[in-house]
Amino acid sequence: MTDHLGLEAELRAAVRGEVGFDATTRALVTMDASNYRRVPLGVVAPRDADDVAAVLEVCRARGVPVVARGGGTSIAGQATGTGVVLDFTRHMTGLLELDPGSRTAVVQPGLVLDRLQETAAPHGLRFGPDPSTHSRCTLGGMIGNNSCGSHSVAWGTTADSVRELSVVTARGQRLRLGPGWAGAPAGLRELAEGELARLRTGFPDLPRRISGYALDALLPERGADVARSFCGSEGTLGILTEAVVRLVEAPRARALAVLAYADEGAAAEAAAGLLPLRPLTVEGMAADLVPAGSGLPEGGAWLFVETGGDTAAEARARAEEIVRAADVVAALVVTEPAAQRVLWRIREDAAGTATRMPDGTEAWPGWEDCAVPPARLGAYLRDFRALLSAHGLRGAPYGHFGDGCIHVRIDFDLLTEAGVGRFRRFSEELADLVVAHGGSLSGEHGDGQARAELLPRMYGEETVRLFERAKAVWDPDDLLNPGMLVRPARLDENLRFSVLPSRPVDVAFGYPADGGDFAAAVRRCVGVAKCRTTTAAGPAVMCPSFRATGDEQHSTRGRARLLHEMLAGEVITDGWHSTEVRDALDLCLSCKGCRSDCPVGVDMATYKAEFLHHHYADRPRPAAHHSMGRLPEWLHWTARTRTAALLNALASTGPLARLGKHLAGITPERQLPRLATQTFTAWWRGRKPSSGAGGRPTSEAVGAGEVPVQDAGNLVVLWPDTFTEHLAPSVGQAAVRVLEAAGLRVALPPARVPGRGAIGDGRTRTATALLTARRARVCCGLTYISTGQLDRARTVLRRTLDLMEPVLRARVPVVVLEPSCAAALRSDLPELLPDDPRAARLSAAVLTFAETLERHAPHWTPPAVDRPVAGQTHCHQHAVLGDTPDRRLRAAAGLTGELSGGCCGLAGNFGFEKGHFEVSRACAEQQLLPAVRRAPDGTVILADGFSCRTQLDQLAGVRARHLAEVLAQALDASS
């Protein structure tokens, strides 16, 4: 048995990098993006090659396996292990040199591919291979798997782009691998030269042959290239510490031809015929992976064929030549870069999209990337579909059609013994089918545990024994990533699902997309790690906390892994009481960015609320949960007692403010927002209703049973959310001004719940009920939800539904000005009260300000503002509500320019809580603050969320406004 404490102590003494044997660190790396799970003893983040050598020396002496890990996006299981995991993404991430003259770069294994591309781009260069995970995969992982990507038809695999590799062997040798036997360990040359016949005849000639060891690269006619033969060895031969890679010239201009075909078979048949035209990509996907409204030409399957040129006209001409040569149903040629990026995102997100069948059924990797000769792809796909049908399985193929490489996720049942048995039988038969077509079991992602067991079917027993002999030359002690490639574990062992509870756990949310099963919701995270992107760009939000800290536990994937291990109960053993999970979720902003940006729709904000609900069910809550989680209650009593001015004065008094913030769990760096001395509803009650056409009032109150359906007309109900009501009533006042100018009648929600009868049943009319009615306020429950006070949230939401009963019965649209509140009503409400039909009705009735004007005042023309804008789309609006109507409304008003994405970092209570200020500010610096600083004079700063406006005010001294305020000011100026 391994002495864990002794191993940890010895490693800490031997290396300068971090050593982690704690539950959190181990839980984060139990899985990669595959079906497999292994629990390591510990994790080391080496600082340099000396640290790597020291780890190997300690582990060799103790007989502990070592596994190298980059971004952890491997799909065959090769980035998991039971010994010590080397995490290269913390320190060994450097781009050490880039030489435009020789078109080479010197990189460390933890460098993310996009960082290399960004540095090479100003020189007109790029690294050729580009997997869809380019924003988070590392060069070390790409070399370990011999990754390819969509441009491999033009620039080949990673092995084609490697010049030299620096590695440390299991026994501590430091080798510099290259052609001409450079760096070959003792015995490798003799092994290869004794098997020349086998090396020349036993390896299929394929553009995407990734399976097994590339021993044929050692042939003399291929330059005896030891570096090339090392590529694709999945960390089983040596540990990479540095690489010299070749760069290629990037086209100055590109065009994208999207070719539509009737079905995937027709697209596959056509792909090989396009290769003589020398395209940059020939990517294929079918309709079952394409979301509605994608903008693709009509068809059942598509090829994405990219062309390049020195000018846009040259690139377009080549794309049009492709279209003429292709027998297509329809075609589209796109030259505008932004439009190309939108289309490419559809293809890149397929790795996650494919994890769900169109009906929501789970689908899994395992046969993710077989490759056959491109000319045989159509025939192979037909046989593959037939095999799926024979086993009662479904899958959605997509991938690198020009290279004959197909990715597919299949709806295997990996939770039951019978389902796992079918998984094995299908795998064996598919391996035989691939071989029958002259193919490779892996065409990109490596063999790992998923396919290594089946390598004898592809190569034969003798060649596999040759692989074992090669492994023994490099690693005679079998220390490096054992169980991969040679003497492999069975493909149906170590499945990550087997440790999860077999019955659904008791939860508060309904999880309708996951059958009410929290474990199924957690299983959504397949590990593709789009949340680990290190730079923010465009409208995307996910994952601001990871970008701020760079720590895996603060990524959506990391948190999902910890929840998985919490349910498994092996590494994290105290369930909902886990401090490891609590601490990882502490820096989750609940921005909901993952809900839309994660390809599989992981909703960490909901999972966080669920966890906090259970974690604090039987223990004291933090002060911030009481002060800010119950904010609507405190602000309501402030208004009732008319003490807003007094509280503002106290909050501006230094010692009292510091004491109050300390008691409330608020970080001292924050200023407390000033309370409005007149609430929005008080202003509403004091105003004179304006008149619309025919003398009808355009503003009114809605009481219980006062809005018959036939009289609803152009009535809208304006939701007085907590922030508008008590902190920013000017937003509500502006919205009323604009809505009325657009010809709409405005009302506020009912404010009385009948005291007797069936509350909210829509039938209670008795005088007694009306006389005993109690005053109440509608509330979306947001602050309770975000702090995990879900029982209280349900109580508040049921009361809200009682109040809103007449509005729902009248089918009146509900306008919500605060995006976070609208998102809570749109998504959280029906998931917290799935059995109350009124919840779904209110959710469907909720509209944003811009949606209301677009749907219910379509002929209204907004006033001309004619100024540029800057600011940020609210993260909840991006994730839940959508901002297309806002874009159209801004354009109609002459507000030009784009708002930034990301999250402001304040995120309701998050940025006010103790210990969060630095992360909150770092999130704001990702996109929002730089965008505002770049804005020229005269720019309108827009931020519909109160948190966003507060963040801008406190960090940049900038006053941002809600779109309603901007339009109302323009109306007043033009009247």
Image (cartoon, rainbow, N blue to C red):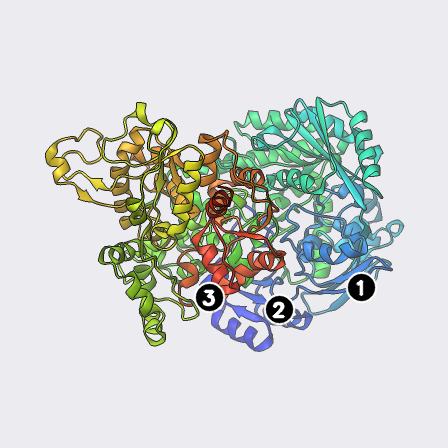
Which mark lies nearer to you, 3 or 2? 3
- Near mark 2 (Cα within 10 A), the count class, few <14, some 14-19 or many ≥20, is many
Asked if 763 appears above or below 533 in the picture, the reply is: above
Residue at x-position 27% and y-position 50%: 792
Disc 3 versus disc 2: distance between alpha carbons? 30 Å
Q: Which label is found at residue 46? A: 2
Residue 173 visible: yes
For marks 1 and 2, the one nearer the N-term is 2
Q: Give the numbered dot on residue 183.
A: 1
Q: Amino acid at mark 1?
A: Gly
Do tag 1 and tag 3 residues touch (Cβ < 8 Å)? no
- Residue 721 lies left or right of residue 247; in this view the side is left
Check the image and report above or below for 26 versus 442.
Answer: below
Secondary structure of the residue carrying tag 3 is helix
CA distance separating discs 1 and 3: 50 Å
Q: Secondary structure at mark 2?
A: loop
Report x, y in % for residue 802: 24, 38
Q: Which mark is residue 967?
A: none
Mark 1 or mark 2, whichever is nearer to me: 2
Q: Position of residue 324 (x, y in %)?
A: 81, 25
Residue at mark 3: 917
Residue 399 picture quarter: top right
- Tell me if mark 1 has few (under 14), some (14-19) or many (20+) residues whose alpha carbon lies within 10 angstroms of its own: many
Res 635 → quadrant: bottom left
Residue 778 visible in rendering: no
Relative image position of residue 143 (x, y in whole percent) = 71, 54
Instruction: Residue type at mark 3: give it.
Output: Phe
- Of mark 1 and mark 3, the one earlier in the sequence is 1
Q: Is residue 502 left or right of residue 332?
A: left
* Residue at screen point 36% across, 70% down: 652
Give the number of marks. 3
For the residues marked 1 and 2, what is the alpha-carbon distance in whole angstroms? 23 Å
